[in-house]
Amino acid sequence: MPARSQSISATTRFAAVFGHPIKHSASPAMHNAAIDRLGLDWRYLAFDVHPDQLAVAIKGAQSMKFLGLNLTVPHKVLALHLVDELDLSAKTWGAVNTILFEAQCASEDWRPLRLCDPDQITALRSHGFNTDADAIIRSIREDLEIELRGATILLLGAGGAGRTAALKLASEGVKKLYLVNRTRSKADEIARELKSRSEHGPQVAIEVGYPEGNIDLVVNATSLGLSPADPLPFDPAQFSLNSTPAAYDMIYRPAETLFLAEAARAGAKTANGLGMLLYQGAKALEIWSGEKAPVEVMCEALRENIYGKV
């Protein structure tokens, strides 16, 4: 269900997603449908922002009094050091995918910009959150019907999304987690962090490299698959999709990547990142608006935008 057309006035407020690339993003369709349902005089936009320009882009959105931002590939880890304040979620899961802009008016405490009179603002700041971690776990459980506690999982990718997924999966009590990344040092870094955390939390066996036997789930957290020309996100000489009954790809456009197509051909149950996008977006909207997100409306808009049907 597309959002109805509304005029933009001098009082219209804005939120946006920053990424590089960004043209594949379905976030504007999802958020603008939700904004319309909530009756807010807001608009949600998408901008291609190179990593070298992320700091100035965040400051620019803050100066223009945007309500908030979403961040996607490749900005999530970089943003940890670019926001003024970190929510516990961002500190815990090691990445920022949602920013809330806040303001002070006179001697008042920091408040979301939506609650502030623009003429009374004396200071602005950016507050970083992570809504990805809970979203990916919910999506995997709902779409693949997998019990993660006690599972053995291969995670492909050690960027911002991969790091968050690794930390969250470990916290869910998986039995063993294999980490693979093109640059091994990044996977080694996550492995060290996970082993350090396991001293005070669930005991998870961590290994950098491909599994030799069967596993319960393989997750693609790389950007390989965004382009039709991309190769598989793993080395077929070292891992076979025949060794897993389930495959999850954080990419949602195209709806079926080469990775998912090959997994389905091997007999695995598959799911793309639509659910993750939906649930992280719903939480972000709630952070910005203070209202319950219309999840069904957002899901309908995503399905129409990505699949061309509801």
Image (tube, grey):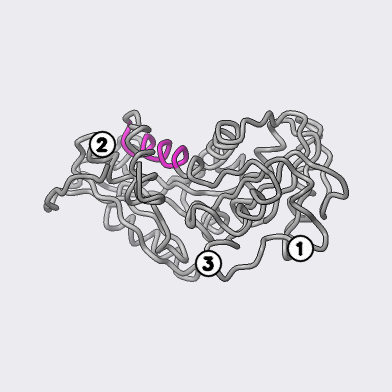
User: The disc labelled 1 sits on which kind of residue?
Assistant: Asp
Image location (x, y in percent) of residue 274: 48, 44
Please report whichever mark, 2 or 3, sits nearer to the chain's N-terminal start. Answer: 2
Of the residues under marks 1 and 3, which one precedes in the sequence?
Answer: 3
At 14% from the left and 53% from the top, the residue drawn is: 8
Name which quarter of the figure residue 137 lies in.
Answer: top right
Q: Which residue is mark 1?
A: 235
* Image point (39%, 36%), residue name: 287
Name the side, left or right, on which 137 lies relative to 207.
left
Left or right of 96? Residue 203 is right
Based on the picture, tell me whether residue 157 belongs to the magenta stretch: no
Does label 1 or label 2 sit earlier along the sequence? 2
Badge 2 element = helix
Percent x, y of residue 174: 75, 34
Q: Nearer the viewer, residue 273 or 282?
A: 273
Of marks 1 and 2, the one in the foreground: 1
In the rendered image of this protein, does residue 82 appear above or below residue 136? below
Mark toward the viewer: 2 or 3: 3
* Residue drawn at (56%, 35%) of the image: 143
- Amino acid carrying label 2: it is Leu
Dominant secondary structure of the residues highlighted in magenta in the image: helix
State which region is magenta: 278-290
Tag 1's secondary structure? loop
Q: Residue at x 68, y 38 (%)?
A: 169
Q: CA distance from mark 2 to mark 3?
A: 41 Å
Report the residue marked by disc 2: 115
State yes or no: residue 287 in magenta.
yes
Residue 91 position by quadrant? top right
The reply to whether the C-beta atoms of the residues labelled 1 and 3 are less than 8 Å apart is: no
Q: Are marks 1 and 2 in contact (CB under 8 Å)?
A: no
Q: Which residue is mark 3?
A: 227
Residue 117 position in % (x across, y down): 19, 41
